[in-house]
Amino acid sequence: MKISSTRVGIADNNFGRKMNVSPYFITANTALDEAVLQALAYLPTEHLSKLVDPAFFQKLADRDFMRLATWLAQKSYAEGGCPIGGVIIDNRTRQIRGKGHNTLGQENDSTTHGETAALRDAGRVARLRGEGPVDFRPMTMFTTLTPCAVCCAQICHRCHFEKVVIGDITNAPSTAPALRAGGIQNVEILEDARAIALYREYSQKRPDLHFLDWGGHQKLAEAQAAGLVPSTLADHKPKP
Ligand SMILES: [Zn+2]
């Protein structure tokens, strides 16, 4: 990933010559493109406030945050894991409060979905800042795939998000009705072509992991009995 010095507004201080230089690596004038979204996705959340001008975040539309979440899904897929990413923003400032991706395979932990990884990151960053428990009520959760029942419960009954944006209801039945029934007033379907393509590729190449992710060994056994998982994929261990 390359960010040109001119695009991000970094200027040479030229041996003390008085210059009006932004203290931020990504300034309000930085072009909004895929390279910058990728950088924002992969930089540790706690460093964003030092590196990114708060005005820059005002330029990001919901579709841009979904692209950012898709970069996180892409990272998980590159690691041999399930390609689902999550991003949490504060609706008042549009700044990122937490982000992450599914690590069910990588960590062998059935609780780390894209959404729960973002929740955990938000709590971790708040703790680093000396803040208390995060109040998610004025925030939006972006998720590249429609949330599972576990994540719906967190979003609705524990966190009470103001808004949820879903990037893919093509590869799984939409859970938007469940979110609305759970009290989320604003649920937006914003399908992202890359997120859909990524999850489709994953579920086709590793249907064993797909069924294991969604319903554990019970679902996997049912899928195997129905002939939905080729016997050549009997070993469902993700690559290290
Ligand atoms: Zn989930």
Image: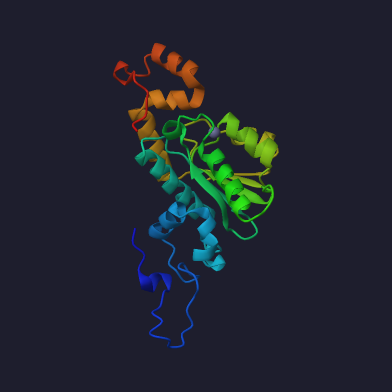
- Which x, y percent locates residue 94? 59, 58
- Which x, y percent locates residue 199? 41, 36
120 in relation to 9, above or below? above
Image quadrant in which the C terminus is located = top left
Count of numbered circles on the image: 0
Compared across the picture, whether 180 is left or right of 97 comes to right
Residue at the spot x=38%, y=34% of the render? 200
**Outermost residue, bottom side:** 17
The quarter holding residue 181 reads top right
- Which x, y percent locates residue 158? 68, 38
Between residue 102 and residue 183, name the one nearer to us.
Answer: 102
- Residue 226 seen by the camera: no
Compared across the picture, whether 32 is left or right of 205 comes to right
Residue at the spot x=51%, y=39% of the render? 114
Compared across the picture, whether 198 is left or right of 92 comes to left
Residue at the spot x=50%, y=36% of the render? 169
Q: Quadrant of ligand 1?
A: top right
Compared across the picture, whether 208 is left or right of 176 comes to left
The quarter holding residue 234 reads top left
- Residue 113 seen by the camera: yes
The quarter holding residue 129 reads bottom right
Residue at the spot x=49%, y=26% of the render? 214
Image quadrant in which the N terminus is located = bottom left
Display coloring: rainbow
